[in-house]
Image: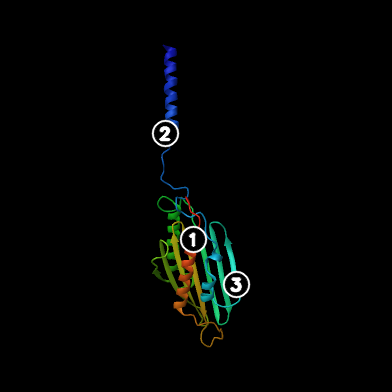
């Protein structure tokens, strides 16, 4: 009887162990990997905007190209023309986000991108007081990515010069692209010799570049593709 009891106890214990080993661990609902359809990388910001668009909205020669960030997750490129009467700067940034425990909701990469998209909007709507940069006039842009907006700022410089700057921020899934185009208007009589810079031209240029950057984002590799 004693031996039989021991055998039964061992069998029961083994059964409990097997049951425990095969029982799935409870999920905490937090996403730790990229989800199907999310982007694996950011595109090359220096090749995302066409030569024709650059010639139209960042005209002049020489045009300086600075590839300041080039990683799989973040890419940034700046195009600059500083030849009177043209001063233009186009900065293109593409950022691929990963899942994060600090992100809202389930912490997915898309939620992380959404959070950072909101941070960009807040920063343009309410710049730090010490920056002396005015609040942007923000307009939602439809038909561009999953969500997008443009932000207009006219920055007055000592001496009467002013910079016209338009920033377009667009999100598609877990990727955020920021396109900023600015031009300099010299004050009359200042001797600066730059301008004129129509606001409509800066707006059109930033949106044209944003569409091309978004196309480069959409062409990138995704999970499951």
Q: Are marks 1 and 2 in contact (CB under 8 Å)?
A: no
Residue neighbourhood size for the residue with mark 2, other residues' Cα within 10 Å, grouped as few (<14), some (14–19), many (≥20): few
Placement of 97 over or under 53, stated as above or below? above
Q: Which of marks 3 and 2 is nearer the N terminus?
A: 2
Alpha carbons under labels 3 and 1: distance apart: 24 Å
Q: Quadrant of residue 64?
A: bottom right
In the picture, the disc for residue 25 is: none
Q: Earlier in the sequence, mark 3 or mark 1?
A: 3
Q: Position of residue 217 (x, y in %)?
A: 49, 60
Q: Which residue is drawn at the image coordinates 44% and 28% (left, top)?
A: 18
Q: Which of marks 1 and 2 is nearer the N terminus?
A: 2
Q: Is residue 125 visible?
A: no
Q: In which quarter of the image is the N terminus?
A: top left
Residue identifier under label 1: 217
Residue sitting farthest toward the bottom? 189
Alpha carbons under labels 1 and 2: distance apart: 41 Å
Q: Are marks 3 and 1 in contact (CB under 8 Å)?
A: no
Q: Where is residue 133 in the image (x, y as percent from the top left)?
A: 47, 72
Q: Which residue is drawn at the image coordinates 58% and 64% (left, top)?
A: 68
Residue identifier under label 2: 23
In the picture, the disc for residue 64 is: 3
Horizontally, is 84 left or right of 151 in the view?
right
Residue neighbourhood size for the residue with mark 3, other residues' Cα within 10 Å, grouped as few (<14), some (14–19), many (≥20): few
Q: Where is residue 162 in the image (x, y as percent from the top left)?
A: 50, 79
Foreground disc of the pair 3, 1: 1
Q: Is residue 170 visible?
A: yes
Q: What element carries label 1?
A: helix
Q: Where is residue 220 in the image (x, y as percent from the top left)?
A: 50, 58
Residue neighbourhood size for the residue with mark 1, other residues' Cα within 10 Å, grouped as few (<14), some (14–19), many (≥20): many
Residue sitting farthest toward the top? 1
């Amino acid at each position: 009887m004693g031996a039989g009891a021991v055998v039964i106890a061992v069998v029961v214990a083994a059964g409990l162990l097997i049951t425990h080993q095969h029982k799935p661990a409870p999920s905490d609902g937090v996403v730790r990997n990229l989800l199907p359809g999310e982007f694996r990388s950011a595109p090359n910001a220096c090749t995302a905007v066409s030569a024709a668009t650059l010639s139209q909205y960042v005209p002049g020669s020489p045009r300086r190209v600075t590839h300041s960030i080039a990683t799989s997750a973040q890419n940034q490129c700046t195009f600059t023309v500083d030849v009177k009467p043209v001063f233009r700067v186009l900065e293109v940034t593409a950022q691929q986000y990963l899942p994060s425990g600090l992100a809202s909701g389930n912490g997915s990469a898309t939620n992380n991108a959404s959070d950072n998209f909101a941070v960009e909007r807040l920063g343009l709507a309410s710049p730090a007081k010490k920056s002396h940069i005015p609040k942007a006039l923000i307009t939602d842009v439809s038909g561009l990515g999953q969500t997008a907006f443009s932000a207009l700022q006219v920055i007055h410089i000592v001496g009467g010069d002013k910079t016209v700057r338009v920033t377009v921020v667009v999100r598609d899934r877990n990727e955020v692209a920021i396109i900023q185009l600015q031009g300099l208007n010299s004050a009359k009589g200042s001797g600066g010799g730059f301008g004129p810079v129509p606001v409509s031209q800066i707006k059109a240029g930033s949106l044209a570049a944003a569409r091309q950057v978004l196309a480069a984002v959409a062409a990138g590799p995704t999970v499951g593709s």
